[in-house]
Every structure is written in C-alpha cells, then in structure tokens.
Amino acid sequence: MRKGRPHVRYDCIVVGGGIAGLQAAIQLGRYRHRVLVIDSNNGRSSLCRSYQNLLGWPNGISGQELRDIGRRQAETLGVKFVSDTVNEGNRDDDCFRLSCRSGSHYECNRLLISTGISDNIPMLPQVRECLGVTVYVCPDCDGYEITNRRTLVLGAGNVGANMALTLTYWSRDLVYINHEQTLVDASLLDQLRQQSIEYIAEPIVEVITDGVNIRGVVLQSGSRVTGERGFIAFGGNVVHSALAKQLGVELLENKHILVDPRTKMTNVPFVWAAGDVVAHSEQVSIAMGEGSQAAIWIHRSLLSE
Ligand SMILES: Cc1cc2nc3c(=O)[nH]c(=O)nc-3n(C[C@H](O)[C@H](O)[C@H](O)COP(=O)(O)OP(=O)(O)OC[C@H]3O[C@@H](n4cnc5c(N)ncnc54)[C@H](O)[C@@H]3O)c2cc1C
C-alpha cells in the first residue's frame, strides 16, 4: 500500500491489540468481517510476566504469551495486523479515517478503541523482569501472592500509603517507602502506625533483584531494606483516551471512556471502547469480556446496514 492512501475500507478497525482488542478481533473474525488491528505493542499486557488469576491458567501465563496466542488465533480467522500508533482520527459521514505515526492512513465503518492505560513505574528498568511474578501493581489481581510475606510498597504520597493499608489484608509484614517523599496525610500516617507498617520517606537508588525475584532496595542513605515481594503505587497512570476525545467521545473526569454498559458503544455512534481505557477494575478477564461484548454489538450494527 502506498503511504497516505487507504485502498480498503475495513468493516471494523480495532485500535489497540492488547487483551480487549485481541478478544474483540477474534469474535469479529468469527463473524467473517474485514477487520484490522492497529497496535503499538507497548501495553500493560506486554509488561506482566505472569497472570495468576485467570481461568484455565492455574500456573499463570505471561501477557506476551497470551498476546501471541491471541494474535495467531485472530490471524487464522483472517484478521489483519499492523504495528503502528494511531495519532489522529476523524469522521466523514459513516467513514472513520485514522492517521498513524508512520504516515499510513486507514478507513473503516466501525471503530473499537482498546488502547488501555500505562502504569507510572519510575523504576521500570530495574523491576521489569519481576512484574507479575514478585512485583505487582494491582491488589485485586495479586494481593494473594504476598500472603504472609515481607512486602515493600514502592510508591509516593497518599497513593502508596493507601496501597500499604490495603495490603494488610494479606500480610502484616509491610514497609512503605515513599520514594518521592510527597506529602502523606497525618490521618494516613496515623493508620500506618496503628497497623505497624514501617514508613520510610527516602529515595530508592536501586532495586535489588535476582532474575524474577525482588530481594530488596538500596536507599539514598546507603541502607538496605529487604523484602520478598513488592508493590508499585505511585499514582499518575496515563489513560490512552486522546483518540476518543478527538472524536467527541464522552470521558469521565479521570479520562476513562464512558460506554453503554450493555453494548460498550460510546456516546458517538459507531465508536466502541473496551478494556482498561474504560472505567472498571482493570483486569484481564474483564477486558476480554468487554472485547467480546463490543464485538457482538459491532456485528449487530454492521448487520443492520
Ligand atoms: C505489572 C502488571 C501486572 C498485572 N497483573 C494482572 C493480573 O495478575 N491479573 C489481571 O487480571 N490483570 C493484571 N494486570 C492488568 C492487565 O494487564 C490489564 O487489565 C489488561 O492488559 C487490559 O487489557 P487492555 O487490552 O485494555 O490493555 P493493554 O493490554 O494495555 O493493551 C492496549 C494496547 O493498545 C496499544 N495502544 C495504545 N495506544 C495506541 C494507539 N494510539 N495506537 C495503536 N495502539 C495503541 C498498546 O500498545 C497496547 O498494546 C496487570 C497489569 C500490570 C501492568
């Protein structure tokens, strides 16, 4: 295809080929629609080394493996994939035109936005191998994994303090390291004391790891704090809803997309959204469910033409 000139109009383009997008693409492929997935390959599912709470995977599965399986399954159903980032979208009557970072353009009749969110992990290079195995971001997903283990909460301000308090459900051996030394409310500091959570307000200069295992951290003062598990809680995650906003989609104050609970369609006709970019508990199984549900209603809308 010559750059800048679309030559095919897809029934549906899925922007974001993570968990929600792949599940939707599989469902749409099974209806034999013409489907394109445009994905920039750097979502949360590319980061997590092991999902432990999924039906069918009692020993866990990495996000990348799940993505690879999903993509192969969608490709066997005729779904096309391109690696690119959608920068801009606009609508002309019933046709959506998407422009990508590479300069390529694509057209479609229906649009699914499943662009997810990005976590704020300042020490990402140091903990990358441990994510989902011994270092986590979501207590609902992985609180179980720290049961009775010494756990370090690497975070900032009230967000980190609240995470440490939440984790007392699973472990009583907790240290909260306020890496950015941002203000923690007096009432929260009080609760940390009451729950015997050690509180340290000092920058972390190194995370000590051994393969996928976190062993502890080195603080600016040179002292070491040991731990067998870690939780990241800095706040400031980025919701990838810029494309939705451009198209006039209604967003919540926290920038997550609002959808119809039944159909997953947004307030803009023929624009759907699924996965973490929509407000929910940010879990794989939920992203999958939303992807399927959006695809079913996209199909119904295509049929009605
Ligand atoms: C460390 C970690 C551990 C986790 N552990 C668990 C767990 O144990 N259990 C659980 O249920 N959940 C867990 N989660 C959450 C889970 O990963 C997410 O809920 C899930 O990935 C959401 O899927 P999604 O498709 O919405 O987003 P993603 O998987 O993030 O996919 C979004 C995709 O959209 C792409 N994209 C974004 N913008 C654009 C654009 N403009 N153009 C093209 N492509 C774009 C991204 O590159 C990405 O590939 C974890 C998350 C992290 C970070």
Image (cartoon, grey):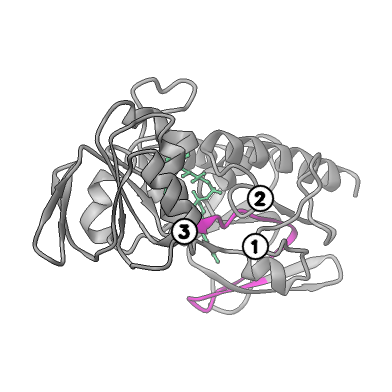
Q: Amino acid at mark 3?
A: Ala
Q: Amino acid at mark 1?
A: Asn
Q: CA distance from mark 1 to mark 2?
A: 9 Å
User: First in sequence: mark 1 or mark 3?
Assistant: 3
* Span of residues in magenta: 98-117
Which residue occupies the foreground of this view, 247 or 235?
235
Which residue occupies the foreground of this view, 293 or 225?
225
Q: Residue at x 21, y 57 (%)?
A: 126
Query: From what the image shows, is residue 148 above or below residue 199?
Result: above
Residue 26 seen: no
Quick one: quadrant of the N terminus?
Answer: bottom right
As for residue 116 lying within the magenta part, the answer is yes
Q: Mark 1 — residue?
A: 254
Q: Residue at x 32, y 41 (%)?
A: 49
Q: Quadrant of residue 202?
A: bottom left
Query: From what the image shows, is residue 112 above or below residue 174?
Result: below
**Percent position of residue 91, x then y:** 78, 72
**Percent position of residue 303, x then y:** 86, 43
- Look at discs 1 and 3 and give the one toward the viewer: 3
Q: Assess whether mark 2 and mark 1 are in contact (beta carbons under 8 angstroms).
A: yes
Callout 2 crowding tier (Cα within 10 Å): few <14, some 14–19, many ≥20: some
Q: Secondary structure at mark 2?
A: loop
Q: Mark 2 — residue?
A: 279
Q: CA distance from mark 1 to mark 3?
A: 25 Å
Which residue occupies the foreground of this view, 192 or 115?
192
Q: Residue at x 70, y 58 (%)?
A: 257
Using the image, tell me which numbered label, if any, was put on residue 66. Answer: none
- Look at discs 2 and 3 and give the one toward the viewer: 3
Q: Is mark 2 within 8 Å of ligand 1?
A: no
